[in-house]
Amino acid sequence: MINIKDGLLRTVFLLTLFCGGQVQQIGPLQPVVVMVDDDIVLPCQLEPPVNAVSMTMEWGRPDLEPRFVYVWHDGQELLADQNQAYKGRASLSIDRLKLGDLSLNLYKVTISDNGRYRCFIPKLNKEYFVELLVGAVSSPGISLAGIHKANSAVMLDCRSKGWYPEPEVVWLDSEGNLLSAGPTETVRGPDDLYTVSSRVTVEKRHSNNFTCRVQQKDINQTRETHIYVPEDFFVAQSNCAASITFSVLFGFMFVLAVALFLWKRRQNEIERSREELLENLENMKSRLTAELESREEEQKCMAQVIETLKELNNGLKKQKEELMVQSQETGRLVGENESKVKSVEKEVTDKEGDKTANKAQGYLKIKEIITQTNWNLEERKREHQQLHINTERLMKSTMDEVKIITERKKEVEKQMKDIEKQREEIESKLQSKRGGRLL
C-alpha cells in the first residue's frame, strides 16, 4: 500500500510539474558557504509569505540523476525518487512552511554536496537557485628544507593537507611583504581534498620571522603558520665544526618535526577511537533502552494475566458458593424425606381396619417417597460432581497460570535489573569520555 501511495503522489507531482506555464526565476544565484560535516540551511522564501504546507515543491540539483534532493507534496514528503546521496540528510520545517519559508535543512555536508540547487514551486511557476560551496581547511606546517652555503640562504618548506576548493599558498616576511617562492605543488586525493606545498628561499634579515599563509578566497578561509630562523643558520659554513653544528641542529629539528607529526597523528587516532567508542556506547544505550521498553511491555502483559487469574479466582468462589447451596438443598431434602416416612408410619399405626392392608399401603407410599428422593439426590449428586470437576479444572488452570507468570515475572525483573545496571555503566562511561574530551 505504501508503494502504491507513493506512486500516486509522484504521478500527481509530475503532472503538476509539467502542466504549468512559464517558470519565473526569483533572484540571482546566491552562494552559500559551509564547512565539511557542518549543517546548513539553503534559503527559499515566498514573497509575499503564504502558507505552503499544502503546496507541492521540489528541491533538486540539475546535475544529478535522479535530480530530486527533497520533494514535498500536500503536507508530506515524497522519498521514492530521492537521490540516495541525500537519504536522511534533508528536511523542511513545518513551522517555517506555514510562513512561506521553503528553506531546506541539509545535514552533515560533504564535498560532493557542492553544486547549484533549485527550489521549485509548480503552483506558482517560480524557481529559486542557490549555489552551495562546501569548504575544507587545515593548518599548514613549516619545516627546514636545506641551506645554500654559497649565499647563506635558508630553504623553507610549507605543506598543508585537506583543503577544498583548491587554495593558494603565499610567503610573507615579518613586515607582511610577499616573498618570491617557487610554484605551488597541488595534489588532489581520492576524497577530493587538496594537499598543497610550497618552498621558499630566504636570506638573513633584521627579523628572521617568516609566515606561510594558505588561503581560499571563495570560502573566505585563511590558515597560517609562523617560523623563526636563528641567525646562525645564515652564517656561511666554512669549516668542519660549523658543518657538524649545522648537521646536529638540522637533525634535531628534523627529529622534533617527526616527533610532533607522530604525536599529532596519535592524538588524531585517539580522538577517532574516542568518537567511535562514544558512538558505540550511544548505540548500546539505545538498544538497552529499547530492551527495557520491551520488558515494560511484558510487565503490562503480566498485569493483564494477573487480572485474568483474579477473574478465575472469583469464578472459583462462585462455584464454591453454589456447592454450599446445593449441599444445603440436599440436607433439606433428606429432612423432608425423614418427615414423610415418619408421617406414613404414624398414619399406618393409627389407621383403623385391616392392619395388613394398611401396612401394605404404607410401604407403597414409603417406597414411592424413597424412589423420588433417591432420584432427586442422584440428580444433586451429578450436579455436585460436575461442579467439582469444573472447580478442579479452574483451580488447575489458575495454579498453572500463577506458576508461569510467577516464573516469568522473576525472570523479567532480573533482566530489568541487569539492563538498568548496564545502562548506568554506559551512562557513566559516556560522562567520563565526554568529560575527558572537554578537558
Image (tube, helix red, strand yellow):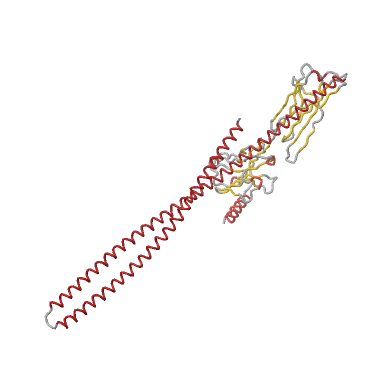
Horizontal side, residue 291 vs residue 21: left or right: left
Residue 436 lies, in percent from the top left, at: 60, 32
Residue 397, compared with residue 57, is above or below; it is below
The residue sitting at 55% across, 49% down in the picture is 74
Quarter holding the N terminus is bottom right
In which quadrant of the rendered image does the C terminus lie? top right
* Rendered view: 41 above or below 258: below
Which residue is pictured at 86% across the width and 21% down the height?
149
Q: Residue at x 23, y 75 (%)?
A: 369
Question: Is residue 243 rendered to the left or right of residue 136?
Answer: right
> Compared with residue 41, is residue 209 higher up or lower down, i.e. above or below?
above
x then y, percent, for residue 238: 88, 18
Q: Nearer the viewer, residue 288 or 51?
A: 288
In the rendering, at what x and y percent does residue 189 appear? 75, 39
In the image, farthest residue toward the top: 206
Q: Nearer the viewer, residue 25 or 347?
A: 347
